[in-house]
Image (cartoon, grey):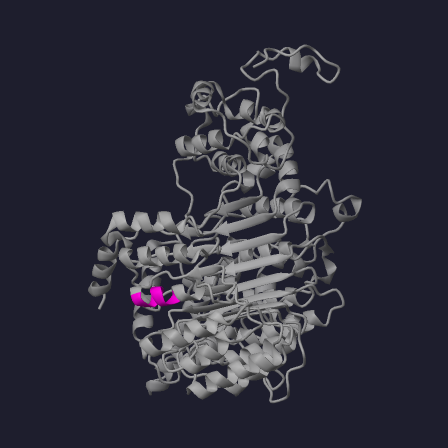
Amino acid sequence: MAGPAAEGPGRGRGWRERRPGPWSGLRRSGAGDCQEEGPALPGPILQSILPLLNIYYLERIEETALKKGLSTQAIWRRLWDELMKTRPSSLESVTCWRAKFMEAFFSHVLRGTIDVSSDRRLCDQRFSPLLHSSRHVRQLTICNMLQGATELVAEPNRRVLETLASSLHTLKFRHLLFSDVAAQQSLRQLLHQLIHHGAVNQVSLYSWPVPESALFILILTMSAGFWQPGPGGPPCRLCGEASRGRAPSRDEGSLLLGSRRPRRDAAERCAAALMASRRKSEAKQTARAVPPTRVTRRSTQESLTAGGTDPKRELHPPATSHEAPGTKRPPSAPATTSSASASSSTSSSKRAPASSAPQPKPLKRFKRAAGKKGTRTRQGSGAESEDLYDFVFIVAGEKEDGEEMEIGEVACGALDGSDPSCLGLPALEASQRFRSISTLELFTVPLSTEAALTLCHLLSSWVSLESLTLSYNGLGSNIFRLLDSLRALSAQAGCRLRALHLSDLFSPLPILELTRAIVRALPLLRVLSIRVDHPSQRDNPAVPGNAGPPSHIIGDEEIPENCLEQLEMGFPRGAQPAPLLCSVLKASGSLQQLSLDSTTFASPQDFGLVLQTLKEYNLALKRLSFHDMNLADCQSEVLFLLQNLTLQEITFSFCRLFEKRPAQFLPEMVAAMKGNSTLKGLRLPGNRLGNAGLLALADVFSEDSSSSLCQLDISSNCIKPDGLLEFAKRLERWGRGAFGHLRLFQNWLDQDAVTAREAIRRLRATCHVVSDSWDSSQAFADYVSTM
């Protein structure tokens, strides 16, 4: 390898003074993409140079190695194994170990979970670890209490943030906890730089059991492109003079965390609702009237002044998202404001003078999680323990009769009005509008009424949004507001929403009616994935005052023609009405892929009706998938599908196909497949095919077959090594060329490892085999233990 390079016109004084290294004659590689896969460095050379390399010099040789046709992927993989000490997921396909290593290295350095001085391969005083690796970061994950946000917006890391703004595409939040005001202000600046002035297109939130309303709304509004500088925060140097002179309005500041008063989170509102409901039920059951405790204006002012809020504004609060204007509040349900709850411990022990108007006793505010900072806590441990004691026994003593609706009334409020301003949500038109993301994903993030209303308010004008995922968010009756906002968004001229993924435990609407409503609201939708796990009658009660879903949501009118290309549906228990599903299929003439999961029909005739509809109205259908369905009595319908000359891929996953009449059904199935020249892929996992069924399928590849099948999945089918070996020999005998992929996961191949290896060796001469080392005996023991 060449020694130190001579001075050239493109190299300055800084280059000449550097200490010559083993790769000092090579230029620094360009930023960005991975090199194409070439021959790896020879083993002895790799072993000799690896101890001399650090990641900074290794980066500099990338361009030269690419020109020489050499691949450094083995070096980066070796560094990953030795330094990261984690094994990538089996589902992950790593195309570039260099990019994967540098992205993980950046995250570890940012969070302080790796010490760069502990290994010479990571330490070099002439390089900044964050700056050097930031150009490889495509996705960044922020966890817990927003670790890393403050460091990234600090002035010493300004160049790091600028680099991230151009390279980062996906921003993820996982397991967020309560954070202080300083961390939220740093996050505000970070989101403004990465989204509004950067290239971030996707924001995903994962596993946030009790979302903090203020933080959640901040992430939503910034993702939607709204921006307002925080109070006392530094002005953005990229926004220009127009944004520096504007002062935030009071409403806008309260939404974007400009207010000093923290919002109450979902757990507090739920606890307050339970306490109010309990007091109301007790008042109904007892004949003795308890005189209400009055709150004096003087005591309230003292407690509010001590908490740092304006007493005049708090004594006369406007309608908030917890209570709509005109809502009649029960006598025992107080106004759920932060100031009133914070002053309950001091004001409840005082009596009001004669001139004071009687007021209901305010609800106690529960102590927040121990990890939360920057919020007010009540004085005295006795009051806190009393709150916890009361809460535990109130929850335990709740009665079911009539109280579910009462809790919904107190926690959700009356949501009859569709104008967000009537629920305390500010009008965002006054805010500056910047670039917004195109993909929003919320996984296991329960949405309170306030958060759901904010999301719906933003969605109605979020024209840049292309993909929306709402997974297990507990929407309940807020699904109606979501549909209204999606309908308003669809009416916008520049609406780009083309993919919607919706899943939840319960739904106030049956899944097929919900699907019809979504298709009517979004006729330009291309991809729709919807799943409901359990049928719901009493869970997530309807909006107070409404006897059922709004009339414009459901209806008997025909669904207009739509642009749906991919439809995935996961059903709860119970038979589904086939005519409703057929109405959706008839309106989806462009459908190319259909997936039905856990679908149950009243009779095989209903299933046949659905298949006949597919044949008549969905001529563009290419892929059809059935999962966890009992098709043992639908063998004629299965044969009808296999004779369809438009389908290219069919999946019967755990459908009990061969449970009845296998000796008669298998030859009929093989005959149908031999005459189908358009079917390219057949997936039959979990159908107890066995050795006999596998040998029968081998006839599909015989010489007299017209089949063009190139992908076969026979995973989880109780196949033994001797049967697989005979299958391989038949393929060799018929002389079929390579037919593509064969998947053999979770079969009984461990019963004879030698025979299994011989069978796989023979099969690999014909097709690409994908298998695993599965312990069938342990799996059977686990199955028996759960019976």
Q: Residue reaching furthest right?
A: 241
Residue 179 versus residue 608: which sits nearer the camera?
608
Q: Quadrant of the N terminus?
A: top right
Q: Position of residue 227 (x, y in %)?
A: 68, 53
Q: Position of residue 760 (x, y in %)?
A: 35, 50
Compared with residue 39, is residue 484 higher up or lower down, i.e. above or below?
below
Asked where in the image residue 696 lies, by quadrant, the reply is bottom left
Q: Residue at x 42, y 56 (%)?
A: 742
Q: Position of residue 196 (x, y in %)?
A: 68, 49
Assign the magenta stretch its main secondary structure: helix
- Regarding residue 165, the answer to whether it shows in the image is yes
Compared with residue 102, is residue 784 higher up or lower down, i.e. above or below?
below
Q: Quadrant of the C terminus?
A: bottom left
Residue 616 versus residue 373: which sits nearer the camera?
616
Q: Position of residue 353 (x, y in %)?
A: 48, 71
Q: Start and end of the magenta stretch?
A: 692-697
Compared with residue 46, is residue 314 higher up or lower down, i.e. above or below?
below
Asked where in the image residue 732 lies, by quadrant, the reply is bottom left
- In the rendered structure, the answer to whether residue 189 lies left or right of residue 531 reads right
- In the rendered structure, the answer to whether residue 553 lies left or right of residue 429 reads left
Q: Does the magenta-highlighted stretch encompass residue 696? A: yes
- Regarding residue 549, the answer to whether it shows in the image is no
Residue 227 versus residue 621: which sits nearer the camera?
621
Q: Residue at x 44, y 63 (%)?
A: 701
Q: Does the magenta-highlighted stretch encompass residue 678? A: no
- The count of marks equals 0
